[in-house]
């Protein structure tokens, strides 16, 4: 009531100025809007309902948008203020708007009402494409988004300086500032610099000697070639790359669960960099390596290399059993977008998760366009073997299996099983269910086909028999009818996996799942034990029929959970699992993320409670053990597991469907038996029919179940005792070959899923979804929606690995420059946006980017170009002018002093002590740590098995403390530029860490073992080894002094282990050891 | 220089100007205390983190309706829970009594803390955005639910610098387990690593990683002198570089730390009365160990360490819960009894001692878990996580005393008045330290980040007029 009052008052108030308007003879339509309405909308409404934010999917910045409306329908009905939501909202009759900003002034409300009454005219009613145009225009305003130019060398005055085209750019800038480049570094310094830069290790004494005594003009070029060819190159540069993709072997948070086989991605990087795979190819592989038409095959290892590229998409942090699964997915995808956009584009796209980017031309829609691309793929393991390796013995196993079927069929056709045999109780299903719930027990009473026999066999022939038979038959028929009746109500059969159309609508990966589902009658050959085959399966999908080592993942299309329960008719064992994957959460293994380890080789209904997740998006997954995104502790290690699935129903009652396959029903067909003898004949007739159908390939599910009963219970010949020698030989042959079938090698990856358009989350609130955004790349590059039934990763890869993309090459050459010169041409290597730095040498950056593309994106060629430049080879001593004019040394008057990275420090210690094990590749070495951590896992050896740091395992919650103190990055996001902190903890580590002491001791031992007769000579050798240069006379004498305190004469000192250990330990602590100049 | 071997004391004196580096002293700027934005109320923070989540309805937020409606279903929407095992309303097994002049009701679980009610600024409307331990632990420590963001202690050290160059400015006393999520939550995130926490292990052989020389002081001095001499030649040869000079000076600091840290940990100088005050004489080893942490916290405050966090020790009855000992999804009565026994007297003792020594006014004690617990039962005798409304308290300089802020609904499920976020908490703590949470920023990957992200406000209602 009070509202109406005010409104009336306002109308009264309004009239004079409306009159005034008319009196002035102005066109009331447009001017009224411009003067009284547009400012109100702009000030009070469009903040939440405009180009930047579309609260409730509603925009109030064009007439069309108002008419279209949002979640609650059109905002205005022209001419009818009472029916217009906008009017109701501002009058606080219904939704109270503006939200939280206080009610509009009475005259403002009145103006809106009046305007609607006028028909809501909008003077400049162009659709709101202004923002988009601006985005495109803004690209041209900003250097990093303009096409890469091909600058020519700038003119320089000095002619005697410079070896490569790079140098002119550097020299020109120096000359402009009246600076001249520092002299060339001495040879020892240069060799140490380039050896660390290219391989992360110090030069060996013989390398120092060779280089310092090689007077030829090609001496340095030869060194560079040697280093680029060294396998150590890839190890060092892979670590740089790992910083970009926040490499980690676990998922963090509570539990810190392992990312299975993560290390294979590290090895992939090392191989790729050593082989100098073109950068654009690597970018393609990182985004869509699993989808490339021509993957890169490693012929030596029989690996599809390309498919390993997307592994970094899995190196995300997950919440632990997150209640809010969508919120967790939001964080995961945000991190993926953050890493991809920073690593490959130097853009901070994830800043646009809540609103348009504040500085760069990146819209909030861009973020959700990419969200759709990434969330349309699913987290899973991928098989990296080539088909050739996977199909070992395939044909022969097929042949043997077919032969076995024929042999068994022949044997079984004439077999007359003992119907009165005592059968053991069926084993209770093992409780391997992660949710702690036992799979459902077999239905009781058990209508195994022999039940009927047991009931009737002792009856006299004739009337009594007939009567009992009729009763039993009636019971059975009633039971069948009951089950059908039960199943007909309240169950929605969503998928029948035995039907090709349903099966093919699912996503299959792995070499075990064929293009078509299986008909009834399949089996697998048992790989050990007394029995030959497991049993006879009904129709369905199975990955393990040839070998349980074969890989297989079967996933349903994405759906919205709209039932309280989902039941699957499944079988399986050995830690294969069935689960409902909610919002792509990879780690769910029970509880509020329904999942169960399968533990029964017979098809049964398995019921998942999905009430908790109603409304969430999900898919059903069945996977072999090693295809699982999370490998349980205590799982078998022989690589074998198996599953099968036939049906999926959705329902709301807490009961699964009943099994309609009642094998005993087969016995009811035909004339009524009059006696036990006739009944026994009936059994044999049915059985013969089943076997005949089996060999003919026309078995029904009921027949399969009937036959299965006899096979599993060895009532038909299936054991070594029952089978003739030639059949046993066949089985043995099969087993031998199956043993040789390799367990597929896996890597973390993503697999295809239902492609969908992600609704924009209004203001970054995932509980407030707006309109869906088509999948595409950034608007600023003019990207159109991807026309693909798949996620669009392939299109994304092409958009980024495109020579016309202005950022891809620039960002990468800048990263290379950063690693070699200690500072990028753009200092903020991960951010080429407006909030980043501008390039110190813009033309040089473009020259390099252009050349990079021209030379086929070769990383090694770029490195060679840069390190052979004069700029790289400068001495690190600044000139007085440079210290004064350019104290930050932006212009590169001299080389920059750099502390070694954490890994290089540790590796250098191992290398100098003679302990370094250069064996490449393989599983990460467990971290050595003493402090308490969450989910730290096993404690590894103090010396890290003497392997390079790149091979040390990286667990998010238990990082290597020695590396961490020297700024090894936390695997959270892209870190193209490491911190180089300077803290006392580093000194404490170098002074007291057991690893450093242990290595000093080992170095000393090896020195003592080498013998030698002269203390001075030994000192000199140690200097050369650790610092890559000869010791000076002063240094030798100071060292002698230090050593002499340990006591003893020359001879005594030579064998004084502790003295040499202390000396070695001291050398590790020299700043010269820890810094490059 | 061929240094003669000096006594440790002489060496320390010299080391304050370097191992003979007087000439370079000016090159490496002391990076001691920095100026705050405005006049601070406090200088130090002690965070008593109750890992696992204390039940507020059993400690500081009495709800008679839980008794009245025992066993009934909740009359309001129940949010999804971790274990999806929602049972009826569960009364508190403990009774509450009003304490102090202010009459603050505190449960009988916390008799000692209750006795300090007039010193407490109780917040009954705390909220978190995460419902599981690791994420909620990250949220309360860093504002974000995952690795990669700086801990509040790191922010404070970044903002204010260190008052004591011989001790780290951010210390975690790790007698107990690291909360779920791992030591990353004590990290400096994108801030330089010098701001991250140092873990001190009061119960371990080596209380700080690598703090213990593996050789005699005399040997180490000789080594340091030799290294220093070589470094001096290196510097002289290749031109002074500020980075290298700082690295050289760090060896002096490291050397001094080797004395300062053991001195800090050495409690022989403390009187028996003091130790008793902290419960260090308790027959319960967990109480004694927690008391030791509280006493060390006071000693760290005395030495100018900015931010100190304490860890709860595990319950011997449930060693699986090493990182989240308050997490009673079942046997709430037993678990909370044990945990309260562990922390109650030591924390009350800490407040008393800080007051007695005149440190209370410049120190803020924060008591909080990562979330509270549900007013309804999980299973038969436990409570699930509740981030929608829970209690925490502050005590010390700049905040009101004997004061209660905010409230939850009559079941203690949702905060309904003066709801407070983690961002508000840290914005307020920064304010007390003289820092404007909107001005304390760090540019990382294209954004100026804040501890309060884009949220948070100083909760002025909590501030005292003193």
Image: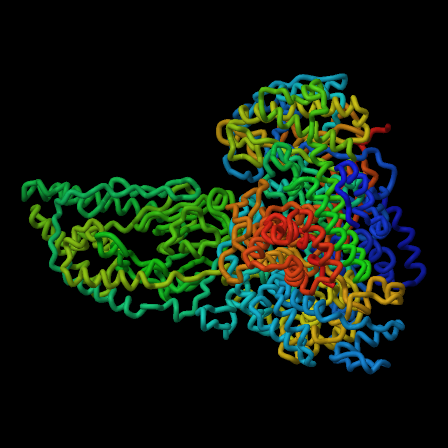
Front-most of residues B463 and B179: B179
Residue A174 left/right relative to A998: right
The residue shown at (70%, 73%) is A867
Front-most of residues A398 and B190: B190
x%, y% of residue A796? 60, 68
- Give above or below for B327 relative to A315: above
Residue A758 left/right relative to B354: left
Front-most of residues B81 and A740: A740
x%, y% of residue A952? 55, 55
The residue shown at (79%, 81%) is A153
Q: How are the colours assigned in the image?
A: rainbow
- Give above or below for A327 relative to B351: below
Query: Which quadrant: the C terminus of chain B?
Result: top right
Front-most of residues A958 and A539: A958
- Give above or below for A185 relative to A541: below
x%, y% of residue A53? 72, 55
Confirm whether residue A385 shows in the render. Answer: yes
Confirm whether residue A68 shows in the render. Answer: no
x%, y% of residue A669? 17, 53
> How many discs mark residues in the rendered view?
0
Picture quadrant of residue A205: bottom right
Residue A632 left/right relative to B367: left
Picture quadrant of residue B374: top right
């Amino acid at each position: 009531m009070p509202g109406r009052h005010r409104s009336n008052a306002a109308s009264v108030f309004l009239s004079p100025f409306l009159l005034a308007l008319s009196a002035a003879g102005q066109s009331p339509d447009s001017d009224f809007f411009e003067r009284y309405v547009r400012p109100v909308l702009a000030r009070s409404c469009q903040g939440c309902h405009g180009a930047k934010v579309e609260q409730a999917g509603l925009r109030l910045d064009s007439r069309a948008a108002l008419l279209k409306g949002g979640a609650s329908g059109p905002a205005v009905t022209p001419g009818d203020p009472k029916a217009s939501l906008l009017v109701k909202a501002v009058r606080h009759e219904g939704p109270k708007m503006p939200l939280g900003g206080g009610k509009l002034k009475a005259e403002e409300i009145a103006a809106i009402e009046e305007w609607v009454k006028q028909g809501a005219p909008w003077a400049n009613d162009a659709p709101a494409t202004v923002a988009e145009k601006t985005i495109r225009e803004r690209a041209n305003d900003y250097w990093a988004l303009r096409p890469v130019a091909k600058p020519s060398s700038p003119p320089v005055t000095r002619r005697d300086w410079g070896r490569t085209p790079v140098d002119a750019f550097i020299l020109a800038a120096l000359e402009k500032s009246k600076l001249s480049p520092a002299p060339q570094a001495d040879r020892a310094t240069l060799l140490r610099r380039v050896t660390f830069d290219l391989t992360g290790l110090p030069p060996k004494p013989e390398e120092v000697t060779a280089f310092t005594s090689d007077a030829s003009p090609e001496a340095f070029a030869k060194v560079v070639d040697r280093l680029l060819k060294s396998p150590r190159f890839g190890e060092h540069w892979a670590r740089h790359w790992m910083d970009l993709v926040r490499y980690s072997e676990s998922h963090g948070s509570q539990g810190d669960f392992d990312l299975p086989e993560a290390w294979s991605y590290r090895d992939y990087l090392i191989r790729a960099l050593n082989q100098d795979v073109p950068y654009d190819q690597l970018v393609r592989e990182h985004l869509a390596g699993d989808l490339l038409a021509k993957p890169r095959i490693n012929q030596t290892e029989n690996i599809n290399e390309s498919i390993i590229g997307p592994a970094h998409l899995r190196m995300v942090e997950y919440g632990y059993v997150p209640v809010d699964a969508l919120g967790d997915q939001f964080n995961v995808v945000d991190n993926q977008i953050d890493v991809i956009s920073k690593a490959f584009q130097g853009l901070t796209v994830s800043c646009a998760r809540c609103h348009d980017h504040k500085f760069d031309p990146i819209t909030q829609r861009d973020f959700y366009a990419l969200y759709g691309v990434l969330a349309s793929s699913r987290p899973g393991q991928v098989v990296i073997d080539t088909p050739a390796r996977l199909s070992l013995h395939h044909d022969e196993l097929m042949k043997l299996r077919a032969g076995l079927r024929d042999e068994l069929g022949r044997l079984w056709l004439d077999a007359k099983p003992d119907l009165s045999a005592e059968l053991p109780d069926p084993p209770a299903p093992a409780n391997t269910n992660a949710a702690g719930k036992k799979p459902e027990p077999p239905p009781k009473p058990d209508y195994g086909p022999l039940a009927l026999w047991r009931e009737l066999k002792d009856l006299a022939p004739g009337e009594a028999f007939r009567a009992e038979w009729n009763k039993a038959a009636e019971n059975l028929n009633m039971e069948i009818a009951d089950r059908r009746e039960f199943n007909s109500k309240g169950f929605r059969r969503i998928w029948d996996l035995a039907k090709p159309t349903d099966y093919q609508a699912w996503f299959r990966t792995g070499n075990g799942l064929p293009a078509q589902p299986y008909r009834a009658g399949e089996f697998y050959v048992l790989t050990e034990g007394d029995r030959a085959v497991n049993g006879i399966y009904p129709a369905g999908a199975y990955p393990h029929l040839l070998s349980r080592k074969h890989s297989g993942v079967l996933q349903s299309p994405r759906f919205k959970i709209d039932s309280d329960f989902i039941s699957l008719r499944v079988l399986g064992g050995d830690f294969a699992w069935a689960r409902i994957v909610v919002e792509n959460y990879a780690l769910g293994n029970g509880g509020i993320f329904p999942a169960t380890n399968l533990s029964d080789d017979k098809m049964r209904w398995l019921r998942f409670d999905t009430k908790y997740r109603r409304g969430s998006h999900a898919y059903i997954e069945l996977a072999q053990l090693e295809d699982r995104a999370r490998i349980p502790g205590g799982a078998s290690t022989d690589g074998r597991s198996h599953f099968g699935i036939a049906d999926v129903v959705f329902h709301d009652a807490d009961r699964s469907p009943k099994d309609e396959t009642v094998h005993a029903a087969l016995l009811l067909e035909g004339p009524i038996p009059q006696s036990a003898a006739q009944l026994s004949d009936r059994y044999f007739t049915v059985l013969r029919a089943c076997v005949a159908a089996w060999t003919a390939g026309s078995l029904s599910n009921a027949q399969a179940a009937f036959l299965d009963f006899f096979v599993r219970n060895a009532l038909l010949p299936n054991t070594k005792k029952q089978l003739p020698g030639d059949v046993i030989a066949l089985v043995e042959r099969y087993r031998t070959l199956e043993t040789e079938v390799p367990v597929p090698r896996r890597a973390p990856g993503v697999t295809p899923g239902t492609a969908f358009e992600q609704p924009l989350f209004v203001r970054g609130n995932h509980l407030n979804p707006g309109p869906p955004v088509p999948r595409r790349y950034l608007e600023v590059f003019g990207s159109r929606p991807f026309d693909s039934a798949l996620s669009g990763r392939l299109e994304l890869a092409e958009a980024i690995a495109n020579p016309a993309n202005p950022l891809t090459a620039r960002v990468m050459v800048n990263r290379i420059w950063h690693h070699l010169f200690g500072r990028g041409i753009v200092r903020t290597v991960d951010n080429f946006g407006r909030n980043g730095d501008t390039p110190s040498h813009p033309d040089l950056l473009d020259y390099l980017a252009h050349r990079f593309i021209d030379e086929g994106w070769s990383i090694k060629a770029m490195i060679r170009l840069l390190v052979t430049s004069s700029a790289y080879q400068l001495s690190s001593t600044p000139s007085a002018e440079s210290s004064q004019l350019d104290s930050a040394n932006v212009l590169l008057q001299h080389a920059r002093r750099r502390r070694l990275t954490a890994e290089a420090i540790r590796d250098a210690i191992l290398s100098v002590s003679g302990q370094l094990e250069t064996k490449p590749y393989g599983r990460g070495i467990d971290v050595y740590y003493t402090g308490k951590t969450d989910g730290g896992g096993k404690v590894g050896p103090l010396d890290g098995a003497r392997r390079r740091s790149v091979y040390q395992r990286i667990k998010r919650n238990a990082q290597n403390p020695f590396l961490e103190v020297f700024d090894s990055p936390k695997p959270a996001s892209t870190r193209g530029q490491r911190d180089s902190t300077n803290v006392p903890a580093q000194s404490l580590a170098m002074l007291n860490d057991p690893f450093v002491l242990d290595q000093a001791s080992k170095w000393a031992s090896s020195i003592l073992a080498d013998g030698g007769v002269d203390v001075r000579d030994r000192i000199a050798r140690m200097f050369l080894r650790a610092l890559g240069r000869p010791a000076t006379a002063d240094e030798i004498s100071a060292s002698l002094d230090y050593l002499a305190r340990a006591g003893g004469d020359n001879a005594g000192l030579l064998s004084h282990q502790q003295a040499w250990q202390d000396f070695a330990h001291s050398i590790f602590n020299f700043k010269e050891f820890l810094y490059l100049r | 220089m061929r240094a003669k071997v000096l006594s440790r004391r002489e060496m320390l004196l010299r080391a304050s100007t370097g191992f003979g580096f007087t000439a370079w002293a000016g090159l490496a700027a002391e990076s001691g205390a920095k100026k705050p934005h405005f006049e601070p109320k406090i200088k130090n923070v002690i965070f008593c983190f109750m890992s696992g989540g204390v039940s507020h309805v059993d400690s500081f937020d009495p709800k008679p309706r839980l008794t009245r409606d025992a066993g009934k279903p909740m009359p309001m929407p129940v949010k999804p829970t971790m274990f999806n095992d929602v049972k009826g309303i569960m009364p508190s097994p403990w009774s509450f009594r009003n304490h102090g002049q202010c009459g603050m009701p505190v449960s009988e679980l916390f008799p000692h803390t209750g006795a300090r009610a007039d010193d407490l600024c109780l917040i009954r409307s705390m909220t978190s955005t995460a419902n599981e331990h690791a994420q909620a632990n990250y949220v309360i420590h860093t504002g974000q639910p995952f690795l990669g963001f700086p801990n509040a202690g790191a922010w404070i050290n970044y903002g204010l610098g260190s008052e004591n160059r011989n001790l780290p400015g951010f210390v975690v006393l790790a007698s107990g387990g690291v909360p779920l999520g791992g030591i990353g939550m004590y990290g400096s995130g994108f801030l330089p690593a010098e701001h991250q926490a140092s873990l001190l292990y009061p119960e371990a052989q080596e209380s700080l990683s690598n703090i213990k020389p593996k050789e005699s002081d005399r040997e180490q001095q000789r080594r340091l002198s030799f290294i220093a001499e070589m470094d001096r030649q290196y510097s002289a040869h290749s031109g002074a570089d500020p980075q290298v000079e700082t690295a050289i000076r760090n060896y002096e600091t490291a050397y001094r730390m080797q004395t300062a840290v053991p001195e800090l940990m050495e409690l022989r100088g403390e009187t028996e009365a003091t130790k008793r005050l902290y419960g260090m004489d308790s027959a319960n080893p967990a109480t004694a160990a927690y008391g030791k942490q509280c006493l060390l916290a006071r000693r760290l405050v005395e030495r100018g360490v900015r931010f100190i966090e304490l860890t709860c020790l595990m319950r011997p009855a449930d060693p699986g819960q090493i990182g989240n000992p308050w997490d009673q999804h079942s046997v709430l009565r037993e678990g909370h009894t044990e945990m309260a026994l562990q922390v109650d007297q030591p924390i009350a003792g800490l407040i008393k001692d800080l007051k007695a020594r005149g440190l209370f006014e410049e120190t803020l004690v924060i008591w909080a878990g990562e979330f509270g617990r549900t007013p309804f039962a999980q299973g038969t005798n436990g409570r699930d996580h509740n981030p929608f409304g829970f209690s925490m308290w502050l005590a010390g300089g700049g905040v009101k005393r004997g004061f209660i802020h905010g409230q939850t609904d009559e079941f203690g499920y949702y905060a309904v008045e003066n709801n407070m976020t983690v961002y508000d908490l840290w914005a307020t703590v920064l304010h007390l330290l003289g820092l404007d949470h909107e001005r304390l920023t760090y540019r990382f990957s294209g954004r100026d980040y804040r501890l309060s992200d884009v949220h948070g406000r100083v909760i002025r209602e909590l501030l005292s007029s003193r």
